[in-house]
Image: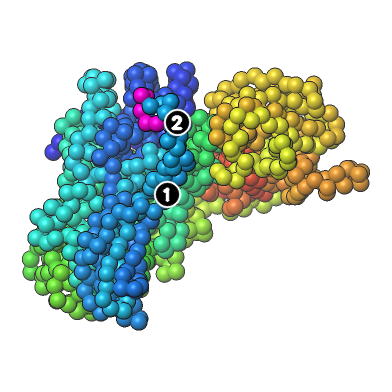
Amino acid sequence: MLSQSISSSRKTDSHGPVGFWFFNDGLNLAEIDYQLDQFVKQKFSGVVVHPRDGLSIPWQSETWFEVLEYIIGACSHRNLKVWYYDDAPYPSGSAGGRLIQQSPELAGKSLLFVDKVAMPVQGVIRIPFSVTGCLLKVYAAAINSDNDLTDVFKDITHYAGLVGDRWFVQGERTVGYGPMFINDNNHPHWRAFIEHENWVLHWPVNNDQQYRILAVFKTEAGDTRHGKYVDLLNPETTERFIELSYNTTLKRLGASRFKNFAAAFTDEPRLCSPYPWTDTLPDDYYRAYNEDIFQILPHLAIQISDYSYEARYRYRRLLGQLWEERFMKPLAQWCQQNGLPLTGHISPEEDPILQTLGSPGLTRLITHMQWLGYDLVLKPFGSSEQAKLVGPKLISSIAHQKAKPHLVTETMGCCGENLTINEMFKLINWLAVCSYDTFILHGQYMSLDGHRKREAPPSIFFQSPYWNHFHKLSEYISELSQWNSQGKPVRPIAVLYPTAAFEALVPVDNNRATALAVNLAELTGGLTSAALEFDFVADHDLVETNIVGSKGNNYFQIGDAVYETLILPDVSILDDATIKTIEQLRDAKITIFSLTKKIGSINSQRNVDFLSMDKQHVILQLVQLYRSWVSFPSDRRLYVQTRTVNDKNQRMLWNPEDHPIAITIRGGEDITFAVSSTLPFPNVKKNKNSENILNLEPFQLIIITDRTPSANSVDTLMRPADDDVAKWEDLWHFAPQEVNTLLLSHWNLELSDSIHAVQLPARSGVLPWNLAGQTVKMWCEIIIDDIFKDAELWWEKSTFGGPYELSINGKKISPLERAHEHSSYEMHANLNEFIVSGVNRVEVVVGPIQRYEPAMLEPLQLKGWFRVLRLNDKDGGLTADLRPDWYKKLLDDDPTLSRIGPLNKIKSITEPTDWTKLGFPQYSGTISYQNKLHIKNTSNRIFLEADPNQVDAFELFVNGLSAGVCCWSPFRLEISEFVKKGINVIEVRVSNTSINRTEGKAQPSGLNGNLRILISACTEKQDTINIPQVSVRQS
């Protein structure tokens, strides 16, 4: 197969994560080199070059291509793979907005239904429609007093038309018309004309009956930054998109450079309306169903009869087929012909109802990608029964059935700047147990200047304090990806994914559709939690199944996947072909569990009865059938993936909960684990039956690679150390590694007649925005107890809306440019000569304002060696206010004032704690916690472990040497080889996220409590570096 040859010829040297690299500012080659080095340093395998909002260089301009050429060469030099992103920015299909600019007729179209109830007045029903668009049809049907239909809808479009409804009075004219009569002013006259027209229904009715009127308009659809989106149901759109994006890039770069792309990423193509339309749809519908689509339009918006279900099913299914034939197939064929694997994802993909509206036919569409993809946005990762379970499993199932070589996920978008590596670790585990082997991390922002930082954060990049530790997660991702790229999944259970039911129900019968979606999610959660491995099977794939086997030992095969059992969710309607297939499977003695009693046909009168069970009963029976190899408490959850590698089963096990779980691996034979620096050895013991009991810690993932004996044995049981073994001294020393930050967010804006209180940043529409051309003054005040060292004021290049002049206490300050501290464009000024003890006033004059935005977009940042003693109106547990009463009164009178005081470099605390309570509420960076550990006995292996509530990454130093980096739970490191008898200096350098600095939120940060001292009775020190497999057996 071509996809296999592509896979082998483009195999990457590393399984590490791929960066979603946001080109969202100017393009500077030195900056590009710096950022590429950052990718290499943190062990990324490649980058997707993603044009993004804020890009100041025209996409596909000559400058763009010159930079792209440079990136291809620079990545090759660094052994990084480059991925082609096919639009600017997203969704794919519009070619950066150029397609509609050049071909406005290819804009996407939508049906808009206007539903009204009316009675005739003086024998006429007259309804004006305030809709921008083309009227297609108007229908009318009589209704009773309960608003129920008493007659069929009939077409009354011929009673509708355009009528002017708004006059413009030009005034009295005294001049003539045309240049010959310009001086003719002897004929004064008035002029007025209609400047606006509306569609109006004017229908004579010879009765007093009440009617339901349904008007159908064709409007332009689109919700993108380009104002409109393209018509993906029109084949000409695809031709133009391929030409403008793919062919233009190929021609400009040349085939030799173009082949350097590892893959093409197409991002979120969608149908941007609840009722998509294309001008050929009437003919398409007639060819497909031998029926006039205008006869069935009312059924799409109203439940008129049982036929309404079939009408909606036909409409949605045809949309999917047209989208597949006219967009996805040609795009995939172009990529295949040019040796470029196509990947990305189609949106929406998580919720079955939104799928039906925005991506009908998703389960067919995505099969045309060589590498299937899914986008996991937001933080839910399966921690509750319905949290982000359906989407990842659905795409993984299709990849299994179609034997796709890679399964790609874009992940972590819209999780916020407070996303920690610990939370990323959980997200990665959830996706890994779903078989994903290529992780694209959303995103790496070239710049955080201005509004860019708010465009679907976080930026998982050099701007984040934890970045220097990120290689740890990259190594972990690489190991999971490598394992997932071997063999094939083992999933004997199939769950019907009833696309036909959603197509028939949505959006009119949304209550039933929602109940079905919830049932599907709960079933998914229950099966997954019970360590039962399954695939979704879309109904259109089920009808193509092959029944294999004989003598009552039958299976059914869909593509490359073979299943023993079928589960039917609580679905009440399906298409006739699917129902017939289910009956054939039942006749062939395939095991079927049903959560529904009866299924009716969408397109016939038949009904099929089933012996229904509740979800829990089904799960219990499946556990008996398929989970004999493991047991664990029924009230706990265990997520499992089994893969066949070299004819042997290997298993990935993940505890998705925040407390430990004990699981029993049945059978007395020994088991082998994959162990490395990022996959630690699990806690294992034997029970009286010689079975292995694994104690998985919160969110721990392990891989069992074999069940054969091995000579190596490791005991990992640990217990707290007594004081006669090791003991901490009473005080910890607390030392920030860089200057503190205070955001100056509360300002006063002086306009000509008023003063406005302004809090920055703010969403659009909150502040006075329409100040273009004006010059304004803004000021704020802070209280400084005593002068501190290295005082600086920082701001971004986009902070001010025009030319500006800054002053402190009436003295003008001059800015300098600084790069690579947090973003590539930051300005700063030294304040040591300007600040005074007491109240300090920061003032800025901006103008003339050059854009339709506020005078100031961002808070300014005050930096230096200080502690925040009071943050606005809340002390938040900060240092107590010991100043005189007049000082306190000043604070009380103005709750927006912050107060700061000097900081000694080393501060003693009795126990490590959240640094936002120690005067660092808006500090994003690294802080050192240091203590001395007295060790009396080194005969045991010694570990240090942070509190279970620890979230921030840290590096641990013992006697000046790094003992390792901890980025996720359990935050534990072995220090045996670094300690000695007597006094040992322990330093923990903790790095938080950037949200404290970027948003001013006092996100709890630092080291939470004393490190626990743990010891293991085993004196043999486990080498966890570069050991591919370690076995455990009974001593």
> Residue flagged by tag 2: what amino acid is it?
Asn
What SS does tag 1 mark? strand
Left or right position of 585 against 866:
left
Where does the image place residue 276, in percent across and percent down from the top left? 27, 52
Packing grade of label 2 (10 A; few <14, some 14-19, many >=20) is few
Residue 453 visible, this angle: yes
Give the x, y percent position of residue 607.
17, 77
Q: Earlier in the sequence, mark 2 or mark 1?
A: 1
Q: Which residue is mark 1?
A: 167
- Occupied quadrant, residue 570: bottom left
Q: Quadrant of residue 145?
A: bottom left
- Give how far across and how far down residue 716 sits, in percent: 49, 50
Q: Which amino acid does the dot numbered 1 rest on?
A: Trp
| Percent of width and height locating residue 649 | 26, 52
In the picture, which quadrant includes the C terminus? bottom left
Name the residue at the front extreme.
186
Span shown in magenta: 176-180
> Is residue 1019 visible to us here?
no
Task: Give me the residue at 27% from left, 60% from top.
Answer: 160
Query: Quick check: 443 above or below 556?
Result: above
Q: Which mark is residue 185?
A: 2
Horizontally, residue 738 falls left or right of residue 975, namely: right
Tell me if mark 1 has few (under 14), some (14-19) or many (20+) residues whose alpha carbon lies within 10 angstroms of its own: few
**Position of residue 522 in the picture relative to residue 324 (left or right):** right
Q: CA distance from mark 2 to mark 1?
A: 25 Å
- Element under label 2? loop
